[in-house]
Image (cartoon, grey):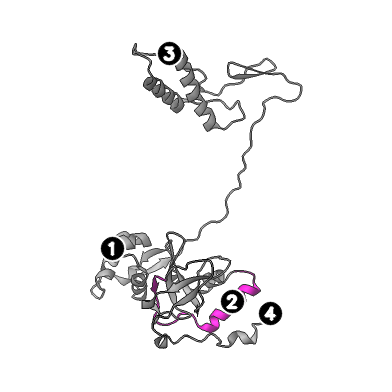
Amino acid sequence: MSSVPADIVENDLKIHDNNFLPPGAVYFAEVIIPLALPKTYTWQVPSHLLHAVAPGCRVEVNLGKNKKYAGVVKRLIKEKPEFIEPKEILNVLDAEPVVFEQQLKLWEWMAGYYMCSEGEVMAAALPTHLKLSSEAILIYNEEYGDDFSKLDNEEYLIAEALLIKKELKLTEVQLVADIVHVYPLIKRLIDKKVCFIWEAINEKYKDKKENYIKRCVAIAGDTLVIRDGLVYVNGQPPLLPPKSQTFYYVETTGQPLDEDRIQAAAEAAYVKARPLDNTDFVYQWRKQMARQYTLRALRDLQI
């Protein structure tokens, strides 16, 4: 078994003393997200959070259009990434780093050694309650009881909702609290042991399915003839399944056969159609053809 290199324990990533940053300084943060991403991504540190962001702290970030995650800041940098416009960090979740800088270096080494991403290492290393995401579910802690007198107004609203529903999605927390950035609120509730995070385990295995096209119902040497929409093999008609419908009758009420009624009849034929599997085409296409045949037949009657 390989040992960790000696330089891994050197604290060569010094925590930036943000109190001495020059006014108007622009910094960016490399953030590790607990996902199997090919690399770390960069977010801009807004000026009002510059004093709070440090390596090892968790921050709330947007990834994609609607996904939110609690990622760990790996390092602060001054250089803006090329060819992209970084989004801003939404919130800082920790007053002090929850991951030491030696651990961040260890994660980086492990990702290289085991040929995985730093996000996968983070997902395995951090406790569940530190890995918030928009898919997370809050579960009410029954041991807390129903005395919410020590909670503030926002915490009280969520605690009451959890007491009633027993679990809430993050989107539901946003609706109940009527705020957008709920991660700091959730962190306070978890710290007070009002609730905990439930991490769903998704079954990744799925049955493999392949589509096959039925080309023919006969074999070499057979004669195949199509008559009135039915396939005859060696002069024998096909075996029709029970309740199959192959003919449609249209009975009018004496009203003019205008285009609106023709369209209505074609739609009714489409809904009711149960076409046989006697072509190379999919079932939905064959139902569509029932509509088209009805349209053409009724338009021929107009003439």
Residue 196 visible somewhere in the drawing: yes
Is the Cβ of the residue at disc 2 closer than 8 Å to that at disc 4?
no
**In the rendered structure, which disc, 1 or 2, sits on the residue that comes first in sequence?**
2
Disc 2 versus disc 3: distance between alpha carbons? 76 Å
Q: Residue 257, image x and y in percent?
A: 38, 15
Q: Which mark is residue 2?
A: 4
Give the residue number, with chain letter if any, for mark 2. Answer: 108
Q: Quadrant of the C terminus?
A: top left
Disc 1 versus disc 2: distance between alpha carbons? 38 Å
Q: Nearer the viewer, residue 28 or 61?
A: 28
**In the rendered structure, which disc, 4 or 3, sits on the residue that comes first in sequence?**
4
Part of the protein shown in magenta: 89-116
Judging from the image, what secondary structure is the residue with disc 1 in? loop
Taking the image as shown, residue 183 lies to the left or right of residue 220, namely: left
Q: Residue 101, image x and y in percent?
A: 52, 83
Q: Which mark is residue 178?
A: 1
Instruction: Indicate the amino acid at tag 1.
Output: Asp
Judging from the image, what secondary structure is the residue with disc 4 in? loop
Q: Residue 280, image x and y in percent?
A: 62, 30
Judging from the image, what secondary structure is the residue with disc 3 in? helix
Q: Nearer the viewer, residue 45 or 64?
A: 45
Q: Which residue is the extreme one toward the right? A: 221
Disc 1 versus disc 4: distance between alpha carbons? 51 Å
Q: Residues within 10 Å of mark 1 (few under 14, many from 20)?
A: few
Disc 4 versus disc 3: distance between alpha carbons? 85 Å
Q: Nearer the viewer, residue 208 or 48?
A: 48
**In the rendered structure, which disc, 2 or 4, sits on the residue that comes first in sequence?**
4
Q: Residue 31, image x and y in percent?
A: 49, 73
Give the residue number, with chain letter if any, for mark 3. Answer: 302
Disc 2 versus disc 4: distance between alpha carbons? 15 Å
